[in-house]
Image (cartoon, helix red, strand yellow):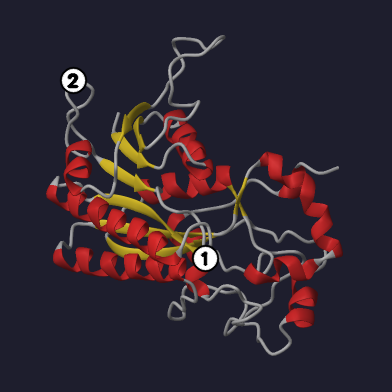
């Protein structure tokens, strides 16, 4: 059994990742500021045999704490084989711009550098669809499906930070050819409780044009994390991670022609298939989304 550290394991995506990894037999440590129900003490009705993640409170802005957390914490664990880095201010506009950058980028540097110092060569972290140029309503993409083939185009401080993290990853892997640093450009993360509101998007499709009507079920985001950890890739790679469909019932090519008439298609996008290209993730990670909002709305 391999030990995987998950930073931000108490967040929406983090909780799904922790569950996915525990279910796959990994020994999981959650590094976060607060524990989640999945990583806390055994609650009423919880069987002692159920796997749980260890929780360690860590300030990722402190390199010393990160390095210690990736090597050993007293008698709780003494080795780490892989790192999943999800902890961050999760979106633009939640705090002042300088706070977003000062939290996210140095924390990611600390995780990358501490993993290198600890001899950990398997690191997966949360990049973001925002590096693709979001919001598309103000900055239309060069083509559909929007994929990894064109240069990143950050338009907010949050996405600038993600672009800087990807550039850091390129050089960390240049310094160490054995290192794997995979950045997963997650679309808007959703869980089952979010899907009741999806039918309303049909009445106001402009409200979701900012990311070409994309989303990712947290469970499929977690699947992508596990597949990235288990891949035999080395070096830096970035992957768009989105659901297989859009948030709409209107065909994708039809809605794209309405809102982005000047944007060409590089291939056919049948039905309500996603306009965020996940072909690379399918090809290189064997990623295949299993969950759709349509399965939860009558």
Q: Residue at x 22, y 47 (%)?
A: 62
Q: Horizontal and vertical percent for residue 263?
A: 66, 86
Looking at the image, residue 65 sits to the left or right of residue 165; the answer is left
Name the residue that disc number 2 marks. Answer: 75
Q: Residues within 10 Å of mark 2 (few under 14, many from 20)?
A: few
The residue nearer to you, when weighing 245 against 160, is: 160
Placement of 208 over or under 229, stated as above or below: below
The residue nearer to you, when weighing 60 against 122, is: 60
Label 2: state its secondary structure. loop
Q: Horizontal and vertical percent for residue 235?
A: 26, 63
User: Which image quarter holds the N terminus?
Assistant: top left
Q: Horizontal and vertical percent for residue 117?
A: 13, 50
Q: Horizontal and vertical percent for residue 136?
A: 62, 76
Looking at the image, residue 248 sits to the left or right of residue 7; the answer is right
Looking at the image, residue 159 sits to the left or right of residue 177; the answer is right
Q: Residue at x 19, y 68 (%)?
A: 174
The residue nearer to you, when weighing 251 against 90, is: 90
Measured Cα–Cα span from mark 2 to mark 1: 39 Å
Name the residue that disc number 1 marks. Answer: 129
């Amino acid at each position: 059994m391999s030990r995987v550290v998950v930073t931000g394991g108490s967040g929406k995506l983090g909780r799904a990742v922790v569950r996915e990894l525990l279910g796959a037999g990994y020994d999981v440590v959650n590094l976060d500021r607060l524990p989640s129900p999945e990583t806390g003490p055994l609650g009423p009705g919880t069987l002692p045999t159920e796997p749980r993640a260890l929780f360690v409170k860590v300030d990722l802005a402190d390199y010393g704490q990160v390095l210690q957390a990736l090597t050993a914490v007293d008698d709780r664990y003494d080795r780490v084989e892989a790192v999943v880095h999800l902890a961050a201010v999760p979106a633009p506009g939640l705090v002042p711009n300088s706070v977003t950058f000062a939290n996210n980028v140095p924390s990611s540097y600390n995780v990358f550098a501490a993993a290198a110092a600890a001899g950990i060569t398997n690191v997966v972290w949360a990049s973001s669809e925002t590096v693709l140029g979001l919001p598309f309503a103000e900055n239309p993409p060069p083509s559909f499906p929007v994929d990894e083939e064109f240069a990143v185009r950050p338009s907010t401080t949050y996405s600038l930070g993600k672009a800087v993290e990807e550039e850091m990853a390129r050089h960390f892997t240049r310094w160490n050819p054995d290192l794997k640093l995979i950045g997963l450009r997650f679309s808007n993360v959703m869980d089952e409780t979010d899907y009741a509101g999806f039918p309303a998007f049909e009445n106001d499709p402009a409200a979701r044009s900012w990311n070409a009507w994309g989303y990712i079920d947290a469970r499929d985001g977690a699947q992508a994390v596990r597949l990235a950890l288990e891949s035999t890739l080395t070096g830096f790679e970035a992957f768009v991670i989105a659901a297989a469909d859009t948030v709409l019932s209107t065909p994708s090519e039809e809605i794209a022609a309405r809102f982005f008439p000047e944007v060409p298609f590089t291939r056919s996008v049948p039905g309500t298939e996603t306009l965020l290209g996940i072909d690379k993730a399918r090809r290189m990670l064997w990623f295949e989304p299993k969950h759709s909002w349509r399965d939860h709305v009558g």
